[in-house]
Amino acid sequence: MEATNQASQKFRDQGIAPSHTAEHLLNQTMVRMFGCGRAVSAHVERKKSKCDYLLPSDLTEQQIAELETRVNEVIAQHLPVYCEYMPRVEAEKLFDLSKLPDHASGDLRIVKIGSYDACPCVGAHVENTSELGRFKVLSSSYEGGVCRIRWRLE
């Protein structure tokens, strides 16, 4: 429980708000491009971050280039980032809530990025994608059905 609380506190840090918002865009872009779920694990930092996805293979150089292009196109749309609250019973119909702690109940905070992404989240985010800078994939690797993408904002 203590590790969960520490992770939750970290994501409330305004210093990583740009990277955390970019993680949402990366997740939605991966879902759209590859039909996979959102990241099964993520380590988001100011300087560089990584996300793990369940995929049948590693990404090709062409797929990485396309992924970067698509995320940067969304950033360039200057989309508003905002929150709405929704009863958990309604959220269960729309979102995978398996990562939420058992004690999360009542209304859930849904972070929306324009009409591009919506996801339950407690973390800090920017107000507009124009605040993110350029998204850059640093590398990817593949092992045991997990594709790890290392990335940063420039």
Image (cartoon, rainbow, N blue to C red):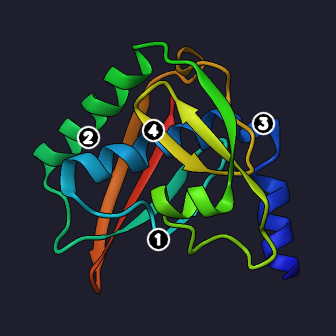
State which mark lies toward you, 1 or 2: 1
Residue 44 placement (x, y as % from top left): 62, 53
Q: In the image, 120: left or right of 65? A: right
- How far apart marks 2 and 3 lie (CA) works out to 25 Å
Given the image, on which type of amino acid does mark 3 rest? Gly
- How far apart marks 1 and 2 lie (CA) works out to 18 Å
Rate crowding at label 2 as few (under 14), some (14 to 19) or many (20 or more) other CA atoms within 10 Å: many
Mark 3 and mark 2 in contact (Cβ < 8 Å)?
A: no
Q: What SS does tag 3 mark?
A: helix
* Residue that appears at 32% across and 43% down: 29
Query: Which numbered disc, 2 or 4, marks the residue that appears first in the sequence?
Result: 2
Mark 3 and mark 4 in contact (Cβ < 8 Å)?
A: no
Q: Which residue is mark 1?
A: 40
State which mark lies toward you, 3 or 1: 1
Given the image, on which type of amino acid does mark 4 rest? Asp
State which mark lies toward you, 1 or 4: 4
Q: Which residue is mark 2?
A: 67
* Residue that appears at 68% across and 36% down: 84
State which mark lies toward you, 2 or 4: 4
Name above or below for residue 17 compared with residue 86.
Answer: above
Residue 10 placement (x, y as % from top left): 80, 55
Residue 31 placement (x, y as % from top left): 30, 53
Q: Which residue is mark 4?
A: 117
Query: Which numbered disc, 1 or 4, marks the residue that appears first in the sequence?
Result: 1
Q: Which residue is mark 3?
A: 15
